[in-house]
Amino acid sequence: MRYHTNMKKNSNSHSKPLTLLGGITAESFLKEYWHKKPLLIRGAIPEFKGFLTPNELAGLACEEDVQSRLITYVKKEWKLEQGPFAEKRFVNLPERDWTLLVQSVNHHLQEANDLLQQFNFIPYARLDDLMVSYAPDGGGVGPHFDSYDVFLLQGCGQRVWRISEQKDLSLLDGAPLRILKNFNTEQEFTLSAGDMLYLPPHVAHWGIAVGDCMTYSIGFRAPTAQELAGEFLNYLQEHRSFSERYSDPNLSVQEHSAEISDDMVKQVSSMLNGLRWNDADVADFLGQYLSEPKSHIVFDIPKNMSLPAFEKRMRADGIQLSFKSQLLKAANCYYLNGEVIVFDADSERLIMKLADDRVLSSHDFYDDANISDAFVAEMHDWYLAGCITFQ
């Protein structure tokens, strides 16, 4: 099923005032608000009412490859259910006080990808996903805070947002969600269709549906130092090799056999000190790590197509990245879904445009008739792996 929207992509010029940001430029937003303070934007996307109905969102929540959650608040107790759900689960839900959330809607709908493209003034390396929620009157996920930046775009209906920059972020014991134990409302806004609220990390907030409503949440990645360190050590293990082996030709008798000697500690410390890395290693790690698909993602494999037939159709119709693909660049390398690829200089313009715009039209190929055989072959491999599709 296709969904239609009147949204148009914003200009890539970051010095141009954007309706999406309330008439300020992307540069001003990043300087004054990003990671610093909330921003309420009335009419961020005029006439926007969303591109999913509640029933369509529930349909997505029933799919095996879609992450979804159902949150209810009954008798002053929060309850959490994880999808996928059977259709009958949505039949006898109460009239109020529950919320359905569906993650990574951008993996399934072109309109969701088009919406995320409007936020391309934030690097793709920071982008996480588009989450869509539906709630009847009173529905929400309680007072909470996020560890990442988020844009909360209102679809159909209305939602009241209460926010607080309080320092007390202690959580309610025993709750299945990260619910704040104490919440002190400092500001309150009612958002209607097309309005948007930006919140930096750790700003406490509480959204409550006013009648039936849907909210589109654009979230950004913010890995912890612990997560990055663990993944980087895994990267080093795969990309470093050491030939040295522990030895102790001058071993002497110890008073206690169970004791690890100072000599052993010093020698192993010396061996580990040989582990070194530089900025190029970190860039390579980030390219692979940030483009790596999440574990639940499965790519749709197309029917086989010969290389000549593929090139003919690519030139005629254009290509686009799969909704589930992430293509990033670091130094002179490109990273597609966790894999590193080096292109020849003749392909640089095309591959950079595909990475930035997620699309190459037939005009792009017409303007660049001398496409290298290596580029065509690589795109053919990506197509057969389900990483790109025809436009």
Image (cartoon, helix red, strand yellow):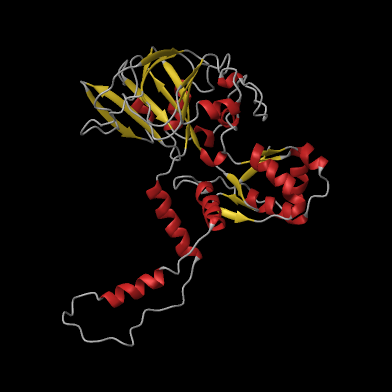
> Which quadrant: the N terminus?
top right
> Which quadrant: the C terminus?
top right
In the image, taking residue 39 as reference, residue 23 lies left or right, namely: right
Q: Nearer the viewer, residue 145 or 358?
A: 145
Residue 2 makes an appearance in the image: no
In the image, taking residue 91 as reference, residue 294 lies left or right, namely: right
At 78% from the left and 46% from the top, the residue drawn is: 312
Q: Nearer the viewer, residue 89 or 374?
A: 374
In the image, taking residue 85 as reference, residue 8 lies left or right, namely: right
Q: In this rendering, is residue 107 above or below 181?
A: below
Q: In this rendering, is residue 135 above or below 390?
A: above
| Residue 274 image point, x, y percent | 45, 69
Q: In this rendering, is residue 321 above or below 97?
A: below
At 31% from the left and 21% from the top, the residue drawn is: 93
Q: In this rendering, is residue 40 above or below 273?
A: above
Residue 156 makes an appearance in the image: yes
| Residue 326 image point, x, y percent | 57, 44
| Residue 103 image point, x, y percent | 44, 34
| Residue 390 image point, x, y percent | 68, 40
